[in-house]
Image (spheres, grey):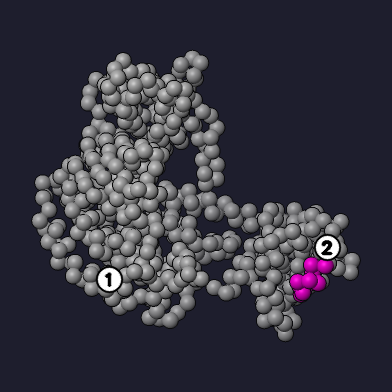
Amino acid sequence: MNFASAQKAEHFVSGSVTEESLVEMQLVQVINNTSKRIAEYSISPHNRDFAFAITGDTGATYRLQVNLMKQEGRHPKLFKAFTLPLILNSAQNYTLNITPSKLNETKNAGWQLKEQRTASSAALISGKILSIAVRSGMPVSLHKVENGELVVQSTVQTTSNGDFEISCPVKKEGFYYLTTVRWKMRIYLKPADRLKVNVDNKSGMPVSLNGSAENEVLYQWQQLVSSITDYGYNLNIVNTDSVDMDNYIHRYKSLQPSITDFFNKTDKSNPQFVKALANAIEVDRQLAPIYFLLYKSQKKVNGWRPTPKDFNEVPAFYQQFIQPGKFSDASILKIGEARQFMTLYAKLNMALFVSESNKKLSEAERLRRMMNIISNDTLKSLFFNDQMGQIEINNLSEFRETFEPFKKYAKLSPAKETYNSIYSQFAGDTVYIGKSSYNFSLPDTSGNIVSMKDFKGKVVLVDVWATWCGPCKAQFPFLREIEEEYANNKDIVFVGISLDKVEVKQKWKDMIKKENLGGIQLLDDFGKGFGRKYDIAAIPRFMLIDRQGRWIEIRCPRPEAKED
């Protein structure tokens, strides 16, 4: 970008990617042959629009780095990169359309940059991060709400003073979130909105705000509920040590009349915002105390509190949040905390149920009860997706018992992809389960050949391991406990199969002695006789054979799971 004037001038370069693609865009500023990345934008198949706000500096030129990505596993990887020069006139907005499949820098093809004749619908958020700890290059991101969670849109770097400017195309008004590595802040954007906000980096709270009436209301709301959120509700680092539970409950109860009064007095001239605000207030009103309890009930270990996963203790005060017919309206998905709220609410519900019934539930039964808490089918599908990502499934039997009953909720994305991805890990096991295990024989420590036929009429637990496998050795103590538990049961046999090479046979024998491994120990020369036959790519692996010599399961839970 070239500037004829020495004065700074703001430009919007907005547009879209014309094909369904995964694209990472990076806006690069060049001054005196020094390049600096000043903004980034993420494009997905469902979100193809982008907008960059550029403040022109004397002597600066700009280019756009376009990285085409491919999804490989959980993380996309770069497979092609292009650099597009941006040559713009001062104080003029532009549209930029990019067609990834046709990009060619040499032929100047696959992209079209044009002057924008109409006003840009892009919103612009500017301000300052207030903290002596802020340094130049601190990333500030703008997130869009998609299906009740945050999806990053654009990221910029602060100046040496903590200043930032970030833009986003806005076609429909709604909630967005400003975030840093430390905090997040909810804002409300409409097409072409301008918002200026200064944020205290320590607390994540807005110190001053100048913008739309909707954002003024959100500013007032954040100030009002600070007494029940200041423990770190909007922070990535939560500190509940300085807040007593009884004092927190007193604060919460005292605040309720003010919350009701706040909403009643809110200007109702924008019905869409009023609906969104009502949802946001209800989420904050319940999630803030539930989130506080999650961290408060987690005990410290050696002075450090690990990230909690479940509720340990639930005061009677929290019974009020459990209500029948909860989560019946999918409009809650316009709130960025919706998915987190559903998960923590369900876990709170389960903690209260288990406490009252004193009953330990299987993962399948636990999921069934949690799914019943959600009323709306769209919400059920998203909740099911999130639970599939949290529940550890060891084998096809567990998959069928735990996830298959809810297959109908996996018809929509993203649950469909998650369900199929987990199933594909175990689908090949059907080749072996129920089939005979009498198709291999291996030598024991004395060199005698042992066949599974030798154990006909007995249940056989197989441990596949190797001397070089750390996780395998970590299971030995737990496995010994199980062996001792069944020491007097002559109908159960424990068999260890090592994938070590025959050349290190003595090392294998030494480890058996050192670790006091019981049962019958066999050597499978680098998997030639057993490991490759059963496609064992990772160890430890625990497998089970029934009395008729048929495989019951080829991916049993690890022995350490016995402690759960």
**Element type at marker 1?**
helix
Up/down of 381 relative to 310, above or below: above
Task: Answer yes or no: is residue 477 visible.
Answer: yes
Q: Please give left or right for residue 532 compared with residue 10 in the image.
A: right
Up/down of 350 relative to 237, above or below: below
Residue sitting at x 32%, y 70%: 243
Magenta segment:
510-521
* Residue density around tag 1, few if under 14, some if 14–19, many if 20 or more, within 10 Å: some
Marks 2,1: beta carbons within 8 A: no
Residue sitting at x 55%, y 61%: 393
Split into 4 quadrants, where in the image is the C terminus?
bottom right
Choose the circle earlier in sequence order: 2 or 1.
Answer: 1
Q: Nearer the viewer, residue 280 or 234?
A: 234
Q: Residue furthest front?
A: 132
Q: Nearer the viewer, mark 2 or mark 1?
A: 1
Residue sitting at x 22%, y 26%: 119
Q: Residue furthest bottom?
A: 488
Q: Which residue is mark 1?
A: 248
- Residue 217, image x and y in percent? 17, 50
Q: Nearer the viewer, residue 460 or 257?
A: 257
Work out how far the residue at label 2 is from the one at label 1, CA to CA, in angstroms: 59 Å
Q: Which residue is mark 2?
A: 507
- Residue 371, image x and y in percent? 39, 64
Residue sitting at x 29%, y 50%: 200
Q: Please give left or right for residue 201 compared with residue 404 in the image.
A: left
